[in-house]
Image: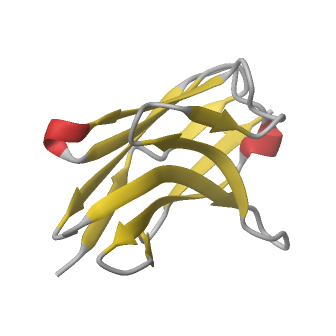
């Protein structure tokens, strides 16, 4: 059974830092990319950052220079280091895995709440 378990969300003051983790298990096959998305109240879910198997990263403009995505392939764990947090970063953060083979499949975690107070 596939499981993506996020952790690390918390309440933090503006300017603070958090580190999110996503532990993946049960996924069989070839993974294309892993990523973090977020959804704020009343807004659509949006891509925050992604990383491919060969380490290529992509960031939303709003987080460039503040957030860093990384992965530990041996432990099937994804991380998001968030610095200089702003109130507008407040959202539920979701881990995402894009599997290519044996069939295209997108997996989501249950989400972890990040709240940044001003």
Q: Horizontal placement of 2 versus 32: left or right?
A: left
Q: Horizontal placement of 110 versus 94: left or right?
A: left
Residue 101, placed above or below residue 77 = below
- Pick the front one: 60 or 39: 60
The residue lying at 14 percent from left, 38 percent from top is 74
Q: Position of residue 36 (x, y in %)?
A: 55, 51
Question: Colour scheme used in the picture?
Answer: secondary structure
Q: Position of residue 108 (x, y in %)?
A: 45, 71
Quadrant hosting residue 4: bottom left
Residue 107, placed above or below residue 47 = below
Q: Where is residue 93 in the image (x, y as percent from the top left)?
A: 57, 56
The N terminus, quarter of image? bottom left
Q: Horizontal placement of 109 versus 62: left or right?
A: left
- Pick the front one: 6 or 107: 107
- Pick the front one: 78 or 91: 78
Q: Please count the marks in the image.
A: 0
Q: Horizontal placement of 98 versus 45: left or right?
A: left
The residue lying at 82 percent from left, 43 percent from top is 88
Q: Where is residue 70 in the image (x, y as percent from the top left)?
A: 42, 31
The C terminus, quarter of image? top right
The residue lying at 67 percent from left, 46 percent from top is 48
Quadrant hosting residue 3: bottom left
């Amino acid at each position: 059974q596939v499981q993506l378990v996020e952790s690390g969300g918390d309440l933090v003051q503006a300017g603070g830092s958090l580190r999110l983790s996503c532990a993946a298990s049960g996924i069989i096959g070839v993974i294309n990319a892993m990523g973090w998305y977020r959804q704020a109240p009343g807004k659509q879910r949006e891509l925050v950052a992604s990383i491919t198997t060969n380490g290529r990263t992509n960031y939303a403009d709003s987080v460039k220079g503040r957030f860093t995505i990384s992965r530990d392939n041996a432990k099937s764990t994804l991380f998001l280091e968030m610095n200089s947090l702003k109130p507008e970063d407040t959202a539920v953060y979701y881990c995402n895995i894009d599997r290519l083979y044996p069939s295209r499949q997108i997996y989501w975690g249950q989400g972890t709440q990040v709240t940044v107070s001003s």
